[in-house]
Amino acid sequence: MHNQPIFVDLQLLKKYDRPGPRYTSYPTAPYFHPGIGPAEYQHHLLHDEGAADGQDLSLYVHLPFCDTLCYFCGCTMMVTRSRDKVEQYLHYLEKEMQLLGTSLDGKRRVAQLHWGGGTPTHLTPDQIRRLGTLLHRYFPFRDNAEISVEIDPRELTREHMAALHEVGFNRCSMGVQDFQPEVQAAINRVQPEAITRQAAEWARTLGFTSINMDLMYGLPHQTRATYAETLDTILKLQPDRLAIFNYAHLPRMFKHQTLIKDEWLPAPEEKLELLKLSIETLTAAGYVYIGMDHFAKPEDELTQAMQQGTLYRNFQGYSTHAGLNLLALGMSSISMLSSLYVQNHKTLPEYYAALDSGQLPTMRGVALTADDRLRREVIVELMCNFVLKKARVAAKYGIEFDSYFGEALHQLEPFVEDGLVELATDQITVTTAGRLLIRNIVMNFDAYLQKKADNKPQFSRTV
């Protein structure tokens, strides 16, 4: 049903292209505030619904170090060649694990682990083994846990991949962005195709069950012709999943992006052409469009989860583990419990100081209201599974759906007219064309966006 080639209507993309959240959480990160600290986090760890149910956990570890600076990057990261700096960070990660461990009852098992960054493979193979061992020491894991890592094919050795596999990693994701030398030079990420191919071969021979590759459109010097070549090359590598990200040029927020000159970037019209080309090329080649930026092979677990209505979304993007409490370790990382989100300190000195004082390094967060939780469920359901059964939501939250969401349903009328959404008495369905504009559709259910505010947060564009 879902692996049909998709035709992209550029006029519709143009019509709806505007800034909006990516909804890795709801409420979104701009609404976090410093009134939430370690005490609130500790309380929720012990008393959250997930704790009461002995629910499985998802763990995220943020490893912020990189060897070089990619000029397009919007992540919390730092360039270092100092091994001592990495050693010190691992020491503090263990302190955070100890503190988290005392706030859990020890019965909850880890069903999912992800290392992100920065560049997790900036660690040496020995450091990878050590961190993997520490995590297994402090947290009990399920035998079939999904354990994934972001890798940078540059400066990667087979020993790095072997060390990752030794400590349980079974999935990897690698940044590619673009295969054109001119584009790679402009973004300071020179990564010949042979290096990417070698990393994928190592992963497969070592027994990694899934390989994801990231591409980016809207980068300097990209044209339709050159990007078609990049897509052809990526299809030959046959990744299990693909993420095609929109380059958000925000030099005011990320100073290093000023190194990418505005005149190098594709015009808005060309950028939409690159998105259209990506979606049409990948779906014609048999990949299933999952939603937002993600594609997967028909047999992949992400595709299966979408077709079975069990797909989920969190700070790592799309996930097959719906609704797990996500505990995040490391500077700047964000944890998600049933009714609380918290973020760690964003600088190393503050992160270290909190842990030295024996406290969880929580700097801010948000406690979810009943309305937040209801709207989160609606947004996640539509973004992940593209169908919302009104009666199920109404019964769960004790509301009359059409009156509670009267304004949102009214705002969806133009989407209905454009063939993006179908509204029935019992359900809301996002059409195939609507999946390309899912961010715009769910923005209608975002109570924070509807409020008039002078200092509205800055979001990337939806297309």
Image (cartoon, grey):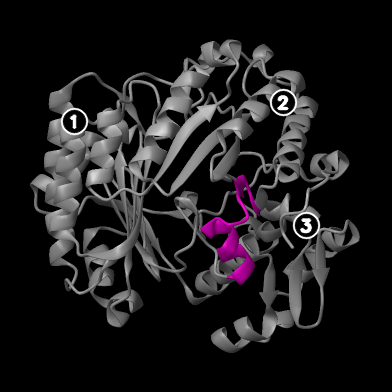
- Residue underneath mark 1: 86
- Residue underneath mark 2: 228
For label 3, the SS is helix
For label 1, the SS is helix
- CA gap between label 2 and label 3 equals 23 Å
Reply yes or no: does residue 300 show up in magenta. Answer: yes
- The spot of residue 387 in percent (x, y) is 69, 70
- Residue underneath mark 3: 432
Mark 3 is surrounded, within 10 Å at the Cα level, by few (under 14), some (14 to 19) or many (20 or more) other residues, namely some
Per the rendered image, the range of residues in magenta is 290-309
Nearer to us of marks 1 and 3 is 3
Q: Is residue 189 above or below residue 458?
A: above
- Residue at 22% x, 59% y: name it: 38
Mark 1 is surrounded, within 10 Å at the Cα level, by few (under 14), some (14 to 19) or many (20 or more) other residues, namely some
The kind of residue on which mark 2 rests is Ala
- In what quadrant of the picture does the N terminus appear? bottom right
Quadrant location of residue 82? top left
The kind of residue on which mark 3 rests is Thr
